[in-house]
């Protein structure tokens, strides 16, 4: 993409309303724009990140056997009356009346609707297990939205719902998502730790939050240090093997880890002092097993092997891609701006032309741009008339993994300059060497 | 995908509420499920089609130089007061109050919001032209929603917005989208004809609807027969060449074509009788040039070459991927079900195992499944215990381009059966020949 044709409204100054670093950086880097309190437009650079995050989430859901669908944002109030949550949900639910005065709402979550879809389509235990998910915008009318897309009212969520004949099956479905989540966050460049969690208004018996550690995290968390060195379950996990899944679950829950809400001081202090981690954390995923909480009142029944109808055991599994974009920045930034992990960077390379109009520099840039794009590398090519200092500041701010600079002086001796955003010195290389280094 | 693990709730009987064939077939094929009047969930099979349509739309928008962003679904009423449309829009606008009694709405379109984003980010004519688009859910509270996703309340729309310094520039931007739309519909397997259109509540001076002909179309349309043989602009169109774009526009508007609303009988009857086409049509795209209708009241100004501030000239360009899914079915079906074009088929091949449990048949199916998937072909593998007749009916109903059948009898003589959904006899082939034929 040529910057001259792109839409990248950089802000030089930190917007004063932004309280946390990810919010400041996302606004300054032209990733998002606030359209109302807690409601954001994703500008082109931000959307590229959001889409990359969603793709990784989707790949790992698919790998674990979950099936994608897409439910609408607007739901009927009557559906929520079936579960009893319509009145219970409180002011966070955005309630709407249509032109015929029918009571509707903007979905804050989808347990009721997916249960309705399931019960209409599945009748027999032979069709189980099933896990259906979607990636859709949700709305929760927070009283005081803040922290940008970290706690916005309209937010993107991947929510998956599992259906099993019994608790043992549901446990395996839970473990599938548990493993898929560990893999998802690792691929996003994050170190996540599952922590036993309160089940909150969604209810249920078994629940984990996936927390990443970040200095600017929203809450205090406590865990055993060894978690930081645990290996992520490999791509070759057999998601049909209940015992293998359970072994990953057992390992990743073997040591102490708890959010503030669930913290037990005595248990934590039983850990040897050098292994205690007390830090700030950000919740990036949340999984629940809640048994027949919805299937019973909503009559989501299957015929079991004994010929009798039985309510299915369910779980739900959430990840917020919009919140993750902010969390990844909280975990990866410096004083100059964002430092994206390769997997979600909006572009992999920022190509800087130091003297547009100089025939040799233009030609060298065009050649590099074409070669990298042809090799499947996303390049943001700064072909604008801005001053070099301003171009460098923009590249640092938007945090692309590689910065490739072409100027008349270096080019006279056949060299361009390549630098990693994550650190290390700039290297003078031939254009060919630079391309080879980027392609790795 | 193994059907035994998929979620494909086929209905054997035509639902009585569905008035048009696409609605009946989408419900029967387990593509969609109604969640409220005019509000649908996209079940896994439907979502695959919707995503493929959106991908083609996106590719052609990108090719034409439009830049993707993503605006939120919920908007502030005050934003619409700036353009004067908040009061004018009428009952189709879903109006919402949040917990603080602020007036909001579910966006039916995005002219106001994109104008707000543009004016905050662009100051100079040097940054023009710009075209920003998004693919996002919209809501129009139709008084009487019907025809399934053809006229739903919550619907997916790709809406693009162009910004130019003057009318001449805006005209070129309009032509870019005009050409992109011709290419988009052709890639979706549709024959589209641009027709001069009334500009309706969005307003403006120049507008075309893109209409496809289908017996079950919603409205009467009239055009010159030669349009049906016009060549689609090629992939190599130079979207920077205003003259080339204008030549495609001129060609595709050279003959008579009009919707009922714009029809001029005398002009139509001046065409020689054998060249007159009077048929039913479905609107699948709509483009508008509306000058400074929004930029003037909303003060979206750029500094021109003369140093003076001037309101930008705008256009908007809509395609509904959710409506297109239905339109493609209206244009492609028979008595047995849907006949998907290859480009948007949810899977390319339906692999039917006639005798699950038979070791040789299972092995042959597994081998074909693995080979096709490895070659990048999406396969829906029916490994269930259903009767053969039911399996064939399902495959015909869901309309995958190829049906590949493996049974014990054929296999004994080394043969499987391959058939195209679009017509022609079943062929007995070796498994290797069948794969080679599918891979083309």
Image: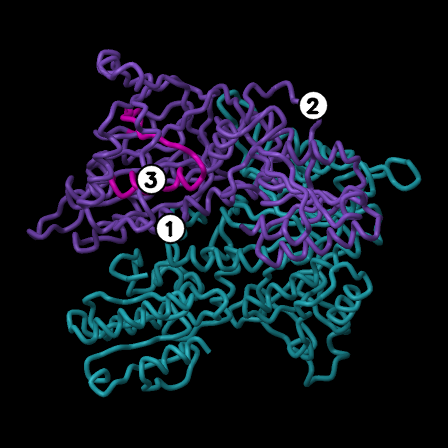
Chain colours: A cyan, B purple
Tell me residue A229's x, y (percent): 66, 79
Tell me residue A173's x, y (percent): 75, 54
Pointer 1 residue: B68
Crowdedness of circle 2 by 10 Å Cα count: few (<14), some, many (20+)?
Answer: few
- N-term-proximal mark, 1 vs 3: 1
Along the line of sight, the residue nearer the viewer: A358 or B126: A358
- Name the residue: 50% across, 45% down: B52
Tell me residue A233's x, y (percent): 69, 70
Residue B232, numbered label: 3
Quadrant hosting residue A181: bottom right
Crowdedness of circle 1 by 10 Å Cα count: few (<14), some, many (20+)?
Answer: many
Q: CA distance from mark 3 to mark 2?
A: 39 Å
Along the line of sight, the residue nearer the viewer: A130 or B398: B398
Residue range in magenta is: B174-202
Magenta-drawn stretch contains B410: no
Circle 1 — which element? Answer: strand
Relative to A311, A374 lies left or right: left
């Amino acid at each position: 993409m040529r910057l001259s044709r792109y839409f990248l409204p950089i802000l030089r100054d930190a917007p004063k309303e932004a309280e946390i670093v990810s919010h400041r950086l996302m606004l300054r880097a032209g990733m998002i724009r606030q359209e109302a309190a807690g409601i954001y437009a994703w500008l082109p650079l931000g959307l590229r990140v959001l889409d990359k995050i969603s793709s990784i989430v989707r790949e790992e859901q698919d790998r674990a056997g979950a099936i994608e669908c897409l439910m609408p944002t607007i739901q009927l109030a009557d559906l929520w009356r079936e579960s009893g949550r319509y009145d219970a949900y409180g002011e966070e639910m955005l309630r709407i009346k249509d032109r015929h005065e029918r009571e509707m709402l903007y979905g804050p979550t989808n347990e009721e609707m997916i249960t309705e879809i399931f019960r209409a389509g599945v009748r027999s235990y032979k069709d189980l297990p099933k896990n259906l998910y979607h990636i859709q915008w949700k709305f929760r009318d927070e009283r005081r939205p803040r922290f940008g897309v970290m706690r916005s009212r309209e937010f993107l969520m991947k929510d998956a719902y599992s259906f099993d004949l019994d608790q043992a099956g549901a446990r395996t479905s839970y473990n599938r998502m548990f493993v898929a989540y560990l893999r998802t966050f690792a691929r996003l460049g994050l170190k996540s730790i599952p922590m036993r969690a309160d089940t909150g208004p969604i209810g249920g018996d078994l629940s984990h939050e996936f927390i990443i550690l970040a200095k600017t995290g929203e809450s205090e968390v406590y865990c055993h240090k060894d978690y930081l060195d645990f290996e992520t379950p490999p791509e070759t996990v057999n998601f049909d093997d209940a015992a293998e899944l359970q072994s990953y679950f057992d390992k990743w829950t073997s040591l102490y880890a708890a959010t503030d809400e669930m913290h037990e001081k005595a248990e934590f202090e039983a850990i040897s002092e050098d292994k205690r981690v007390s830090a700030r954390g950000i919740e990036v995923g949340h999984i629940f097993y809640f048994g027949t909480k919805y299937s019973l009142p909503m009559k989501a029944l299957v015929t079991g092997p004994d010929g009798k109808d039985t309510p299915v055991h369910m779980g739900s599994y959430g990840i917020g891609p919009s919140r993750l974009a902010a969390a990844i920045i909280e975990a990866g930034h410096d004083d100059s701006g964002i430092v994206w992990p390769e997997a979600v960077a909006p572009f992999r390379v920022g190509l800087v032309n130091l003297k547009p109009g100089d025939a040799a520099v233009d030609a060298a840039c065009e050649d590099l741009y074409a070669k990298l794009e042809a090799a499947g590398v996303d390049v943001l090519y700064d072909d604008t008339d801005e001053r070099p200092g301003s171009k460098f500041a923009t590249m640092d701010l938007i945090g692309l993994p590689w910065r490739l600079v072409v100027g008349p002086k270096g080019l006279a001796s056949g060299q361009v300059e390549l630098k990693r955003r994550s650190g290390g010195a700039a290297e003078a290389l031939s254009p060919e060497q630079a391309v080879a280094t980027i392609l790795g």
